[in-house]
């Protein structure tokens, strides 16, 4: 008996269509909420909410980056650290954060203000310093 040769071509087009559809569904249903985001300290307020009266005992802790200096302010009391040769005085900021931690051990919020003209790397370096030293709720405000 002689064997017959068979040529069977496998049609790959349906398989490619199936896999491209599966990849589309995978991308649409992937969990994207694992990406870190900056906290902006914005509280949701609806039109039916009446604004709460300001607390006279609340202390605002702010770090402001300007072109030539960094200011750390505790309400009206401000400390200024000069930026020399494009080097941020982050060691002084860390010492100031340690003082704030001793005064307000339960606080984790601070507001980071920046001018529009400052380099982006200044804001990121300062933000990382704040978060890395226990101030996890950093609100960013650009002017």
Image (tube, rainbow, N blue to C red):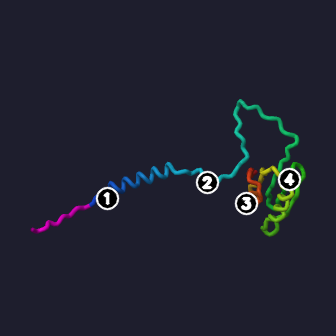
Spatial CA span between label 3 and label 2: 16 Å
* Start-end of magenta stretch: 1-9
Left/right of residue 25 with respect to residue 50 in the rendered view: left
Disc 4 + disc 1, Cβ < 8 Å: no
Give the spatial CA distance, label 3 vs label 4. 18 Å
Q: Secondary structure at mark 3?
A: helix
Residue 136, placed above or below residue 86: above
Return the residue at label 2: 35
Q: Nearer the viewer, mark 2 or mark 4?
A: 2
Furthest toward the top, the residue is: 48
* Residue shown at 84% from the left, 57% from the top: 71
Looking at this view, is 88 or 119 the one in front?
Answer: 88
Q: Are marks 3 and 2 in contact (CB under 8 Å)?
A: no
Q: Which residue is mark 1?
A: 12
* Residue behind mark 3: 128
Mark 1 or mark 3: whose residue is earlier in sequence: 1
Task: Report whether residue 51 is seen.
Answer: yes
Q: Which residue is mark 4?
A: 73
């Amino acid at each position: 008996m002689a064997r017959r040769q068979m040529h069977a071509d496998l049609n790959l087009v349906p398989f490619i269509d199936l896999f491209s559809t599966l990849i589309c569904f995978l991308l649409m249903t992937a969990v994207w909420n694992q990406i870190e985001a900056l906290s902006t300290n914005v509280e949701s307020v609806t039109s039916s909410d009446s604004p709460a009266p300001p607390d006279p005992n609340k202390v605002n802790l702010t770090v402001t980056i300007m072109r030539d200096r960094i200011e750390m302010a505790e309400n009206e009391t401000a400390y200024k650290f000069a930026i020399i040769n494009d080097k941020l005085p982050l060691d002084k900021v860390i010492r100031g954060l340690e003082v704030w931690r001793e005064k307000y051990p339960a606080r984790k919020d601070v507001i980071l203000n920046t001018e529009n003209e400052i380099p982006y790397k200044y804001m990121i370096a300062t933000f990382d310093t704040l978060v890395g030293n226990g101030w996890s709720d950093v609100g960013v405000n650009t002017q």
